[in-house]
Image (cartoon, grey):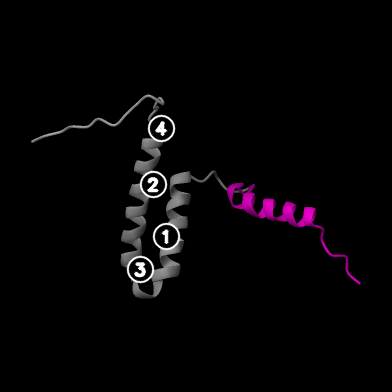
Amino acid sequence: MSEQPTRRDFAAGLALLAVAPLAPAADDKPVDPTVATADALLAIVKARYGKHLTEEQLTAVRNGLLGGTFRAAQLYKTPLKNSDEPAFVFGV
């Protein structure tokens, strides 16, 4: 008779699974978060639409995703205070 894991063991295992992709491997160089994000999004695109896309199209999609994640990272670096509001320009 094998011992079944407890709820605590199961929760600890889930926590390790959630954190594992974020931990760099010992022999790998650190991965740029924007590249990792773009590659994760590309994996979703491949899973959903991969059979309809050529390698050339997938490369174009990856380049677009890299550009978008890089621009998003640049926006996150902009410090904002809670009182900052968007600049509205009204024209007639």
Which amino acid, mark 2? Thr
- The location of residue 65, given as percent across then percent down, is 36, 53
Which amino acid, mark 1? Leu
Which amino acid, mark 3? Glu
Mark number, residue 77: 4
| Quadrant into which the N terminus falls | bottom right
Which amino acid, mark 4? Lys
Write the residue at 37% across / 42% down.
Answer: 72
Mark number, residue 55: 3
Q: What segment is highlighted magenta in the picture?
A: 1-26
What residue is disc 2 on?
Answer: 69
What is the spatial separation of the Cα atoms under label 2 and label 1, in whole angstroms? Answer: 12 Å
- The location of residue 7, given as percent across then percent down, is 78, 56
What residue is disc 1 on?
Answer: 42
Sequence-earlier tag: 2 or 3: 3
SS at badge 2: helix
What is the spatial separation of the Cα atoms under label 4 and label 1, in whole angstroms? Answer: 24 Å
Image quadrant where residue 76 sits: top left
- The location of residue 63, given as percent across then percent down, is 33, 54
Q: Dot 3 surroundings within 10 Å: few (below 14), some, or many (20 or more)?
A: few
Write the residue at 55% across / 45% down.
Answer: 29
Write the residue at 82% across / 58% down.
Answer: 6
